[in-house]
Amino acid sequence: METPDGWELVPAGTPTDGARWVIVDSMEDLSDAARRHGISDRAITLLEHRIPGVHPPAPGHAQRARVDRSPDGELILTTPTLSYVESTHDVHTGALTTVIGTDVVLMAEAGDAQVLDRAVTKLTGGFPVPDEGVHQVLAVVVLTLVAEASDVEIGLGDAVADAEQLVFSTAHQRSPLQEIYDLKREIAEARRALSPVTSVLPELMAEAEEGPGRRLSQPWLRRAEAWVDRVDKHLDGYDDLLSDMLSVHLSQVSVRQNEDVRKISSWAAIAAAPTLVASIYGMNFEHMPELDWTYGYPLAIAAMGAVCVTLYRLFRRSGWL
């Protein structure tokens, strides 16, 4: 399979002459593939120290990103990847390790972001490549990685919009608290994975500025850096919006509780008036007014009803009912 400028995409175990792009199926096999394709021992030592899994991150934290250059000139890049499950609003993180030699690029990916698959499609589909030499593969892969992160940001933005509709919906629905907290957790995970990429891009930029004949690398690196910054700002905005929605929801709950208390208090006051009259007339005294009247009972009932109706209208007018 041919890639731009004569680069050949070959299986990991296939020896060949000329420029090669090797995709290794497993991170554990990356060191062996590097030995077979002529990567120096000192670069392999760095690689074995940086391969994801050698120093596993803490639970819930993305793989750390790092750029290393061996004394023989090979470049080793490790960076996290992002993917988004739209049905569950889950953000998954993985890792991508790249080894760049003189005429060979080796890559291995862990996780379900499928960055390498999309990069292969671009490189073999005639899409323009913003670099030259071994760095053209790196350029396409890094830009694809950032594009995947942008897709994750768009998916989270849609989920935040759905949560906003749920918070402000007048229909009686489930509480949005769980959804808000889940989205804030996923946004935090996405930002933790994106933050290392933000720190790696300036290192790649400095490496490009110092390296001879690397002028083509600087424009796409600047574009990628600006792209990542924009995605991170959007994620930060989504997190702030979710915090505002949480405050609004809690305020709505407080308002509804106050309304319920006012309604309960109003009905309690309406019920208290006839209860008071009935309790007085229920006392066992002989000398009480109107006990011997023929119309005393219906008059008392009518008076209690009139008091209840008056109180009801007053509470309705004041907005308590």
Image (spheres, grey):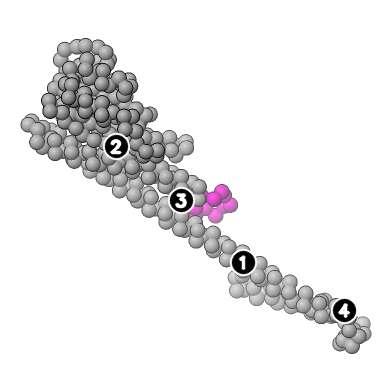
Residue at x 33%, y 29% (from the top left corner): 53
Can residue 99 be spotted in the picture? no
Residue bounds of the magenta highlight: 165-176
Q: What residue did someone put label 2 on?
A: 64
Mark 4, residues whose alpha carbon is within 10 Å: few (<14), some, or many (≥20)? some
Amino acid carrying mark 3 in the image: Glu
Mark 2 falls on what kind of element?
loop
Percent coordinates x, y for residue 9 in the rendering: 24, 17
Residue lying at 65% horizontally and 70% vertically, measured from the top left = 265
* Above or below, comparing residue 264 to residue 199 in the picture: below
Give the quarter of the image for residue 107.
top left
Name which of mark 3 and mark 4 comes first in the sequence. 3
Marks 3 and 4 sit apart, C-alpha to C-alpha, by: 58 Å
Disc 2 or 3, which lies upstream in sequence? 2
Element under disc 3? helix
Give the labeled residue for mark 3: 164
Between the C-alphas of marks 2 and 1, the distance is 52 Å
Estimate the spatial distance between the alpha carbons at disc 4 and disc 2, rounded to whole Å. Answer: 85 Å
